[in-house]
């Protein structure tokens, strides 16, 4: 029997809301990627080149520590991974998360929330970070996506 997990990182609550709705719509388990050190509003100030998020995103090798762990990752066949778009890609903490597990024989489905930026090359990045997974192209989802829309999208993956 196939088991599905929706994993997400959310800085402002938008991605969390979409992830909860997606998990509910498709009957999946839900898991939040929690940073070991929480992001403050100053950390998230993209206009400040010295903010934590700006520094992390300018260094592709940055791996912010994750303070939460999926205890039973082996139980899942399909993992939806949600995040806000930062600097036209997934936040570095998603890269940390992807390197924490062996995704062999699993399907990874990135989904992003953004006011206007597309999902960019996230699927390509996921493939590099989880080389033994099957990575689906993924999609940018709006904060207002209904459960029916989310279910329809997920069913067609």
Image (spheres, grey):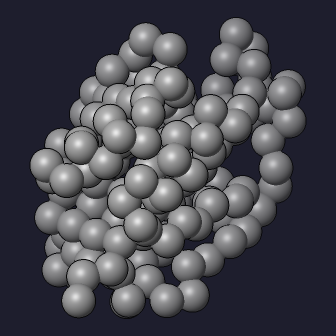
The location of residue 144, given as percent across then percent down, is: 50, 24
The location of residue 45, given as percent across then percent down, is: 75, 19
> For residue 55, which quarter of the picture?
top right
Q: Which residue is painted at 72% across and 68% down in the image?
A: 67
Left or right position of 98 against 109: right
**Numbered marks: total:** 0
Q: Which residue is painted at 61% across and 77% down in the image?
A: 69
Instruction: Look at the image and tell me whether residue 132 can be seen.
Output: yes
Left or right position of 16 against 127: right
Q: Which residue is painted at 32% across and 36% down in the image?
A: 149
Residue 7's place in the image compared with 56, above or below, is below
Residue 41's place in the image compared with 83, above or below, is above
The location of residue 138, given as percent across then percent down, is: 25, 42
Left or right position of 76 against 135: right
Residue 51's place in the image compared with 112, above or below, is above
Split into 4 quadrants, where in the image is the N terminus? Answer: bottom left
Left or right position of 121 against 88: left
Instruction: Look at the image and tell me whether residue 128 can be seen.
Output: no
Q: Residue furthest front?
A: 148
Q: Nearer the viewer, residue 5 or 45?
A: 5
> For residue 16, which quarter of the picture?
top right
């Amino acid at each position: 029997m196939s088991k599905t997990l929706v994993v997400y990182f959310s800085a402002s609550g938008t991605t969390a809301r979409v992830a909860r709705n997606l998990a509910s719509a498709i009957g999946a388990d839900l898991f939040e990627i929690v940073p070991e050190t929480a992001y403050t509003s100053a950390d998230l100030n993209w206009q400040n080149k010295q903010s934590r998020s700006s520094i992390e995103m300018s260094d592709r090798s940055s791996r912010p520590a994750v303070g939460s762990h999926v205890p039973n990752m082996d139980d899942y066949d399909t993992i939806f991974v949600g995040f806000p778009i930062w600097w036209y890609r997934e936040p570095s903490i998603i890269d940390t998360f992807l390197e924490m597990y062996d995704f062999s024989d699993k399907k990874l489905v990135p989904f992003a929330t953004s006011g206007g930026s597309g999902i960019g090359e996230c699927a390509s990045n996921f493939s590099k970070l989880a080389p033994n997974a099957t990575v689906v192209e993924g999609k940018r989802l709006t904060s207002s996506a209904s459960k029916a829309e989310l279910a329809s999208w997920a069913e067609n993956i």
